[in-house]
Each structure stands twice: as C-alpha cells, then as structure tokens.
Image: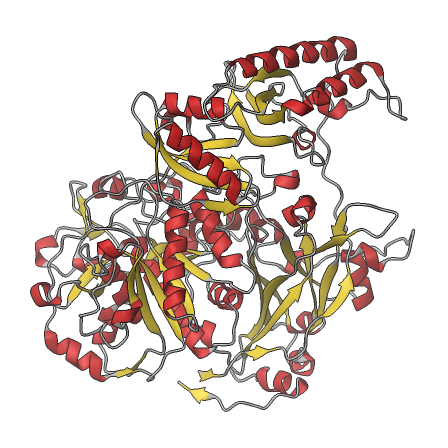
C-alpha cells in the first residue's frame, strides 16, 4: 500500500448558536401525601435529628458550626436531591448520596446533608410552607422536595459517610482511609491537618483537590472516624484507600548477546527526540544496551530520592523494553530497519520494600508527572502506567485516583495523554481457575482502579499466541484460541449500563495460558511476548512479558510513534487516531456475539472496546482510504440573555466536509463504502458520591456528533438537530436522522469522552452525506455556575475517514486539490 499523511482541515468549522432538541428528562414522580400529616411528621423528625446530631459533637478543636443530617426516600423512590442544598448561602450542602437495600430487599436512597447552625430554620420553613401554602397552580409549596422525603435522621458517625463497600470499613484495627472533605481551599486543608494532629492520627503526604472536594489519606479505626465526624464540619465521604498490585514473573532468560548487537545495528534514531514515552512504574535500569541509547540518566527519576531510580523488581524495565520495541520476537525474526523517533523517560512511583501500601495514588501520580515535566518541559510525552489497585470494587465509579488522572489530562493548556492498564483477571485467583472458567471470569472481572478514568486510554488484552513448542509442555494446549480475549484481561461488562465510559477502549497482545488434560494451567514463554531483563549481566538480555501490562506498553509504543510523526497533533488527536484505527478481529467478535445487532455490539464494547489498533492505519492515509482531521475549540455553555436567568448551551460547530463526490458517484451503485467518525475530548472531573446527576454530574461537559441523512438538505439537517436554527413556532419538516447507517449507534457509542462509529452505505449515499455537526451536552460547568467555569472553552479532535473496497480508486488526491494543499508523494510499502 501507499503511505500518505493524514489531511488536517486548514480552516475552522462554522460556529452557530445552539439549543438542544432533546426533551427534558422526566421529573421524579411526586408521591401522594397527606400534606398536614406528612409535613408535621418531618418537622418533628427534623427537630429530633437536629438535637441528636448536636449531642454527638466533641469540643476538641472548636465545636462544629453545624450538624449532619440524613434524608431518606421511600423504598424504590428517588429523593429530589437537587433541592437538599442552598447554593446561595453555601451553608447547606449535599455531601453524598447512597443507595442501600432495606430488610425487604428494596432500594432506598439516602442523602447526607450538612446544615450550618445559622440555617437551622431553612428546612423547618419549607415544611411549614408545604403544610400551609399553595403555589399559583394550587399545589403545596415545595411539594416535589418534601413529598420525596420519607424520613429524616441524625447522620450516623461513619455509616452515613462510608460510600465504599460496607465490608471494607475499619473496626478496632486501623486501616488507611480516604477522607473526602467538602471545600477546595488551602485553609480547609490546614484546618483538617490541625484536627488530625490533635487526634494523633497518621496521614499520608499530600492532598488531591477537585471542584468542591479535597481528598486526604489517614490511618484510622472506626472510633477515630467517629471522632472526626463529631469534630469536623468538613467531612463529605469516607472510602478505603487503595492498594496496588505487584507484577512478577519467575522465568529464566534465554537469549544471546549477538541478537542485541544485531538489533542495535538496525535501529534508526534521531540525534534529538522531541517526544517521549514516560514510564510510571518501579523504575527502569537503563544500563541495558537496548535501553541505553534511548533513556538518559537525567531522565531516570523517582518521586522519593531515598528510593533511588533503579529497578529492583523488573516490571518497570519490562515496560520500557516493550514501549520501545513491542514484542522483540517480531524484530529479532527479521532484518528490517527499526525506526525509533522518541525517547524514553522513567519516574519511579513504587518503592522496593516488599509491601504495597495504601496511598493517595492520585497525588503520587501527580508528583511523578511534575518531575518528568520539570526535567524536560519542552517534550511532547505520553504517560504509560500499568500500576492498578488490587480490588475491583469501584466498577466504573470514579475514585480519587482515576479522577486525578482525568484532572491531569484536562488542565487547560496542560493537556496530557495517559495510557493505563485495565488490570489483570488473575489477581487473587490462580492460573488454573482463570483457565478453567475462561472466558466467564475474564468477562465478569471488573477493570481495576484507575482504569475507569474517562480521559485516559485503558488497555485490555487479546492474544494471538497459541503455538507451544516447549517439549516439557507437549501435553498442554492454549486456553484461548488465536485472536480471542486473553485469559488475563478484564472488562467493564458488570458496570452500571449507560453510566460510565467504555473500558477498555483497546486490546493488544497480553499473552495466553497453557492448560493440561487435568485442568492445571500455567504461564509459559511460548505464550508471552519478549521484552528485556532488568539484570542483563546476570540474567541474560531478554525476558518474557505478559498480561495487560504488556498490552499497555505496546499501545504506548504506538502513541510514541504517532507523536514523533505528527508533533503538532494534540493529545486528543493522538488518542482519537489510536481508537479510530481499531477493529475487532472476526474470532474476537464471534467469541461474544454472532450478530450485528446494536444491543449485542454494546456488550462487545464493554468487553474489548473498539478492538485492536493498527499502527499503519493510525499513521497514514492511502489513495483509497483518506483521513480528515479537525482540531478545534468550542464554548459549550453561556449565560442566558436577559430577562432570562441561568445558563444555557451556546455553540455548535458545523462542517461541510470536502468530499470526493464525483469519484464516489462514478462508482457502481452496489459498491459499499465506509465512513468512520471519531470525536475525542477531555472532560474536567467533578468526583464525589453525590448522585452523578443534576449539578453533580461527573463530567464538566459532553460533546456529540451527528451527520445528515443522505436525503437531507443542509437546512433540514441543521433545523433537525438545532432548535436555535428554527423560526418561532416553526413546524419542523419530518426528516429522519442517519441512525440506520451507523454500525454501533448513539446509544452504544455516546459514553465517556471519546466516541467512535462507522457509517456503512453505498457510494452514492455517502456522496451526499458530508454535513457533520459537533454539539455540546450538559455538564457541571453549566449546572454548578457558582464555580465560575460556565464560560470555559474546550478542545476536541474530530477525525473522519472514508474507505472504498476498490484499491485502484483515488479519493485522496481530489480532496487535497479541493483544499488547495500540495499533493504529497506517496511512499510505497
């Protein structure tokens, strides 16, 4: 095939005022109540709860200035949580929302609320007005709020704040606990630090700050947490701190030094690299001859100088070798030149002490990022991390760790690209169980924290390794067949549907397991990729590598190559190109679905994301396969124009794509063509267990794309998707969307902060389907206007490619000509 550079659109999209056509979400159904009886009951319960809460306070570092209350719904009903706080005074704040089962197995919603002493009459007044006053429509005042409340109690000192699994709470023995504080100021951190010092509580270094939340890790028992709640106004949540998993492989090296020499002679490396892959791991030993030219001493760092920068555990060096070379077996088998255009960096974030301590891991990662960027601020880097938590209890719910990664990636003018592993299915179980219950265990094992990060690319594992040549294993066979899910992979199939991102987005080679006739399973060299050892002088030069760590390092290698080839591309664009290049091998797709029904494909997405990325496709276009790229900024929200108040959506972007219409229309009518669209952007996180809706949505904003139906004109398309384009009281012409042409559909793809789908139709239909829009959706930037983020702009990358099955059709040159760009010379491969 020929290699041609992708086409970056030289002009920005048309900007239009935008109003969503979506209907309002159905409000919470109002429970029928006897207003006098119900209002009087809540008044009495509020008074009782207030006195009980005040009685629990301790006079240590100044008395609390308010109380913690718990509002309870009827079984199976929702609370109107949005009305449980007063945003004008900021003295009544919603702290967390939990759903628990009652004795009858019914779900009840619980909301913990802080009420300052000066606002004691706030709810009492609402209950009184509910009993005695009507609205203009004749309904009781505050009916939606008051009728949704079944009971009010004094908040329990720990249970009302514990948003993690109940079984993880500390008892008499202390545990490392994340304390989530309401607020975001340095003064609030100092107040809390003084308190834990007075209570003689140990704490981990550092804090993480999010919008209206601060996270600190302390070492506490149940009674310690009770004292904290009794004395502090700042508590919002308690969660168990995270422990990381270790990765060790006890296999001997088996390669010879002349292979290293041969490979070194074939490497094509520039004198100065402007991009890099930064490994956040156990350190890297750069004395290995295959690493020495690419990893300078000054680029080996540690978040703690006392740890040193060297790798004593092997995992970091394995990651580095794979991030540079991929599977070394493939390179050693041929004599081709090996281009490596990027450098390596290493920041040690794990000490060698035989223990994985619970930490505030988001803070640890931020420290590692800071050290790399201070050392070489000019580099365009990709962060690669295969360190995950040992448990799977989050199941998509944002943690302080995953949210900090989202925060690091999304900071304005400091966007970063993170590639992280999904974690391994074999943690906590043996290889034999993982093999015997394959693939059920892998499908139901949740991806590990921080894999649920919205902005990072999360990597699972596939395998193509099925040949076992070791004579000692001649009675063994591979657990997974070629091009199917690796026995080490994890998924998001058990996460709450439609609420959290598609994870993992991509799968790469993670190795296989071998199983004998008795059901015993083991790792083996034949079913692993090849990387490098951390002790070349005593172990040889090469070492086997597997699991999702190996897959993650391989994707980092692809990202490094892309950044080196296209240094002007944004982080959002590199991420988009990797996803855009992916597809499912037929065996992988058939392993989990035999149809192309959208519901089945949605399940497939939750297991293996968008499939296996193709580096050549990500790097280059071809004559019969072109890729268009737009990098743009959009302002999603704005303040409503007077006399209206509040916030609203602001802009949509509109593209009239430079389509090779004449070439497409000249193709036979029955020729099928494909158009793929990928939209990538970074959200700013708003974590905290506060219901994930209304003003407490996790994402700052969302973006969506749409394209015109082949029979739809430009004007009809714009009016269909945008109320602001319609005249007042205009009756909309009944035009249909292009939903029937999409392979996945919006219901499956519109999750997280990257959306990719393939349009399939005839060449004639594609010729008239060239209008595309990018539109904002609601997020906390708009709903939490008091934080002052409502007028922010956000970057996005839009990638559109079209491909014909006919190799001799040139659709690339006409588009370049239309755009007035120079025609590049294709490189034949």
Where is residue 702? Give x, y as percent: 63, 53
- Report the front residue among 666 and 159: 159
Indicate left or right for 194 with 71 as reference: left
Q: Residue at x 49, y 64 (%)?
A: 575
Horizontal and vertical percent for residue 12?
68, 74
Please indicate whether residue 175 sits to the left or right of residue 252 in the image: right
> Quadrant location of the N terminus?
bottom left
Residue 155 seen in the figure: yes
How was this image coloured? secondary structure
Q: Is residue 148 above or below residue 502?
A: above
Residue 170: name its quadrant: top left
Can residue 604 be seen here? The reply is no
Q: Is residue 154 above or below residue 94?
A: above
- Residue furthest to the right: 729
Q: Residue 23's spot in the image, x, y percent?
A: 76, 44
Q: Position of residue 90 (x, y in %)?
A: 66, 35
Q: Residue at x 43, y 55 (%)?
A: 589
Image quadrant for the C terminus?
bottom left
Which of the pair 406/625 is nearer the observer?
A: 406
Identify the image quadrant of residue 196.
top left
In the rendered view, tell whether residue 116 sits above or below residue 395.
Answer: above
Q: How many marks?
A: 0
Q: Nearer the viewer, residue 775 or 45?
A: 45
């Amino acid at each position: 095939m020929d290699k041609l550079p992708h086409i970056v659109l030289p002009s920005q999209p048309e900007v239009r005022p935008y109003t969503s056509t979506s209907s309002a979400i159905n409000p919470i159904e109002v429970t029928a109540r006897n207003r006098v009886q119900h209002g009087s009951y809540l008044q009495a319960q509020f008074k009782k709860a207030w006195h009980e809460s005040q009685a629990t306070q301790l006079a240590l570092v100044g008395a609390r200035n308010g109380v913690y209350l718990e509002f309870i719904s009827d079984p199976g009903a929702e609370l109107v949580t949005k009305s449980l706080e007063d945003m004008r005074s900021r003295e009544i704040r919603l702290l967390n929302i939990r759903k628990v089962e009652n004795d009858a197995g019914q779900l009840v919603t619980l909301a913990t609320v802080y009420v300052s002493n000066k606002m004691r009459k706030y709810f009492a007044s609402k209950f009184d007005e509910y009993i005695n006053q009507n609205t203009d429509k004749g309904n009781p005042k505050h009916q939606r709020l008051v009728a949704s409340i079944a009971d009010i109690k004094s908040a329990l000192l720990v249970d009302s704040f514990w948003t993690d699994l109940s079984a993880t709470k500390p008892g008499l023995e202390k545990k490392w606990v994340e304390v989530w504080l309401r607020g975001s100021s340095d003064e609030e951190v100092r107040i809390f630090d003084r308190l834990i010092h007075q209570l003689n509580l140990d704490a981990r270094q550092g804090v993480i700050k999010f919008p209206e939340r601060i996270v600190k890790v302390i070492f506490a028992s149940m009674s310690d947490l009770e004292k904290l709640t009794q004395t502090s106004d700042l508590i919002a949540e308690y969660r168990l701190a995270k422990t990381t998993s270790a990765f060790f492989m006890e296999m001997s090296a088996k390669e010879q030094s002349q292979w290293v020499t041969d490979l070194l002679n074939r490497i094509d490396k520039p004198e100065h690299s402007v991009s890099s892959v930064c490994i956040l791991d156990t350190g890297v030993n750069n004395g290995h001859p295959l690493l020495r030219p690419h990893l300078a001493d000054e680029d080996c760092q540690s978040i703690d100088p006392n740890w040193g920068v060297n790798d004593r555990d092997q995992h970091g060096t394995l990651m580095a070798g794979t991030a540079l070379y991929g599977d070394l077996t493939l390179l050693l088998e041929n004599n081709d030149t090996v281009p490596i255009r990027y450098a390596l960096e290493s920041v040690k974030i794990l000490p060698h002490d035989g223990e994985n301590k619970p930490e505030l891991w988001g803070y640890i990662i931020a420290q590692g990022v800071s050290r790399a960027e201070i050392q070489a601020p000019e580099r365009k880097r990709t962060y690669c991390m295969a360190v995950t938590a040992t448990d799977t209890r989050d199941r998509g719910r944002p943690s302080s760790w995953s949210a900090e990664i989202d925060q690091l990636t999304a900071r304005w003018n400091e966007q970063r690209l993170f590639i992280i592993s999904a974690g391994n299915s074999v943690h906590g179980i043996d290889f034999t169980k993982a093999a015997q219950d394959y693939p059920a265990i892998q499908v139901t094992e949740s991806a590990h924290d921080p894999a649920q990060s919205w902005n990072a690319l999360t990597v699972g594992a596939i395998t193509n390794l099925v040949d076992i040549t070791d004579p000692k294993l001649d009675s063994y066979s591979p657990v997974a067949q070629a091009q199917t899910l690796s026995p080490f992979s994890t998924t998001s199939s058990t996460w709450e549907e439609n609420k959290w991102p598609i994870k993992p987005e991509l799968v790469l080679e993670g190795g296989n397991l071998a199983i004998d006739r008795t059901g015993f399973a083991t790792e083996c060299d034949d079913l692993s990729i090849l990387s490098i050892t951390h002790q070349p002088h005593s172990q040889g030069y090469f070492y086997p590598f597997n699991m999702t760590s190996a897959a993650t390092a391989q994707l980092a290698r692809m990202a490094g190559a892309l950044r080196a080839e296209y240094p002007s591309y944004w982080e959002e664009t590199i991420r988009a190109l990797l996803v855009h290049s992916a597809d499912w091998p037929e065996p992988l797709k058939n392993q989990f679905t035999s149809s192309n029904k959208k519901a089945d494909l949605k399940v497939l997405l939750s297991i293996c994301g968008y499939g296996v990325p193709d580096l050549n496709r990500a790097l280059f276009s071809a004559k019969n396969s072109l890729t268009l790229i737009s990098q743009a900024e959009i302002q999603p929200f704005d303040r409503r124009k007077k006399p209206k108040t509040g916030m609203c959506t602001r802009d949509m972007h509109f593209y009239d794509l430079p389509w090779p219409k004449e070439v497409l229309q000249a193709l036979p009518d029955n020729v099928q063509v494909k158009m793929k669209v990928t939209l990538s952007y970074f959200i700013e996180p708003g974590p905290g267990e506060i219901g994930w809706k209304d003003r407490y949505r996790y994402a700052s904003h969302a973006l969506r794309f749409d394209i015109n139906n082949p029979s739809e004109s430009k004007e009809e398309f714009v009016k269909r998707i945008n109320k602001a384009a319609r005249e007042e009281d205009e009756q909309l012409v009944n035009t249909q969307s292009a939903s029937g042409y999409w392979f996945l559909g919006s219901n499956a793809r519109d999750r997280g902060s990257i959306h990719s789908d393939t349009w399939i139709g005839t060449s004639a239909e594609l010729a008239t389907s060239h209008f595309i829009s990018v539109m904002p959706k609601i997020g906390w930037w708009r709903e939490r206007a008091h934080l002052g983020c409502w007028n922010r702009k956000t970057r996005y990358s839009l990638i559109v490619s079209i491909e014909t099955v006919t190799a001799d059709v040139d659709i690339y040159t006409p588009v370049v000509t239309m755009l007035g760009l120079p025609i590049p010379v294709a490189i034949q491969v």
